[in-house]
Image (cartoon, rainbow, N blue to C red):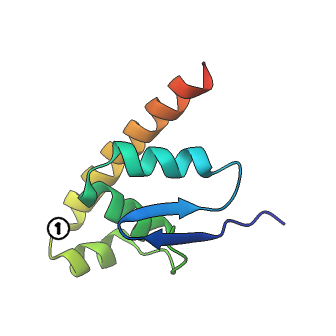
Amino acid sequence: AYEIASCLVGSELCIRDSNSKKLSQFINEELSPREKMIIVMRYGLDGSEPLTQKKIAQKLNISRSYVSRIETKALKLLRKRFDNSSNL
């Protein structure tokens, strides 16, 4: 079974899976605090249940469409960075 153990150390996300350490590093280095917060909540990377965009919007007191825009931007950044590092 594939399993990711994750934790938050201060404001740093750490994922204890050899295949995911690079992703954790990219999230911590490339994303703004708000982008990181939304990605962590959206996908449950801190070990909690993943949240819908609507629930994240309610927690942060912003619109669901704004959450969607932030999530889309963050995922594009991560994909670009991850693709570039794979070519090294």
Q: Position of residue 54 (x, y in %)?
A: 30, 74
Count of numbered circles in the view: 1
Q: Position of residue 48 (x, y in %)?
A: 51, 80
* For residue 70, above or below residue 76: below
Q: Residue at x 23, y 80 (%)?
A: 58
Extreme-top residue of the structure: 88
Looking at this view, is 49 or 28 the one in front?
A: 28
Quadrant containing the C terminus is top right
* For residue 11, above or below residue 77: below
Quadrant containing the N terminus is bottom right
- Taking 13 as reference, is 3 left or right? right
* For residue 77, above or below residue 20: above
Q: Position of residue 74 (x, y in %)?
A: 35, 46
Q: Residue at x 35, y 66 (%)?
A: 11
Q: Residue at x 57, y 44 (%)?
A: 22
Quadrant in the rendering for residue 12: bottom left
Q: Label 1 belongs to which residue?
A: 63
- Taking 56 as reference, is 14 left or right? right
Extreme-right residue of the structure: 1
